[in-house]
């Protein structure tokens, strides 16, 4: 599937789940990811709990629930592979219409992930995993 097009045209709600070194899980609402030319996906992150967890544990899951009747979407199993702090790079991928303050602009990070596995939003047995 062409994930760049999918995330450009599909409305919905995203949840990014991360865990710290003790396995304590955090889930946070995140916008649609930015799909990079190399097939990785990236999120613009502030230095909060999800970002702190990724400094310790590079694995995450992004659940995307499409804005439609019923339950349709995907679960993306991710591995952090790089991050950038360049305000110019972050602004280049930022979607139009997003408002930011000078404080959030200075602290933002562009965190990229390799997609290890994709599952549908619902379904799949342990045997299929």
Image (cartoon, rainbow, N blue to C red):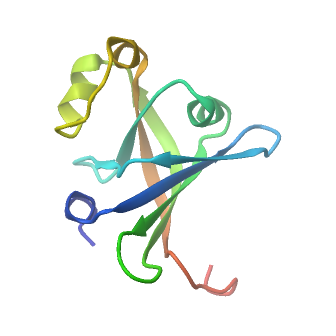
Query: Looking at the image, which is closer to me, 123 or 99?
Result: 99
The residue at the far right in this view is 22
- Residue 117: image x %, image y %? 50, 66
- Please, is residue 78 above or below residue 12 in the view? above
- Can you tell which quarter of the image residue 2 is in? bottom left
Q: How many marks?
A: 0
Residue at the spot x=51%, y=42% of the render? Answer: 80
Q: Quadrant of the N terminus?
A: bottom left
- Please, is residue 86 above or below residue 76 in the view? above
Residue at the spot x=45%, y=70% of the render? Answer: 74
Residue at the spot x=39%, y=19% of the render? Answer: 104
Query: Looking at the image, which is closer to me, 101 or 38?
Result: 101
- Can you tell which quarter of the image residue 54 is in? top right
Q: Quadrant of the C terminus?
A: bottom right
Q: Is residue 51 left or right of residue 99?
A: right
- Residue 45: image x %, image y %? 45, 32
Residue at the spot x=22%, y=27% of the render? Answer: 91
Q: Is residue 46 left or right of residue 57?
A: left
Q: Is residue 112 left or right of residue 17?
A: left
Query: Looking at the image, which is closer to me, 58 or 29?
Result: 29
- Can you tell which quarter of the image residue 92 is in? top left
Q: Is residue 31 left or right of residue 117?
A: left
- Please, is residue 88 above or below residue 33 in the view? above
- Please, is residue 127 above or below residue 105 in the view? below
- Residue 50: image x %, image y %? 59, 37
- Residue 16: image x %, image y %? 53, 50
């Amino acid at each position: 599937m062409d994930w760049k097009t999918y995330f450009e045209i599909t409305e919905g709600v995203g949840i990014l789940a991360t865990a710290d070194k003790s396995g304590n899980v955090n889930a946070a609402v995140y916008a649609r990811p930015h799909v990079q030319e190399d097939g990785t996906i990236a999120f613009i992150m502030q230095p909060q709990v999800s970002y702190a967890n990724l400094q310790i544990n590079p694995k995450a899951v992004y659940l995307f629930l499409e804005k439609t009747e019923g339950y349709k979407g995907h679960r993306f199993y991710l591995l952090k592979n790089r991050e950038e702090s360049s305000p110019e790079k972050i602004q280049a991928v930022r979607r139009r219409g997003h408002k930011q303050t000078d404080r959030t602009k200075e602290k933002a990070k562009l965190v990229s992930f390799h997609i290890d596995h994709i599952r549908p939003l619902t379904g799949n047995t342990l045997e299929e995993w």
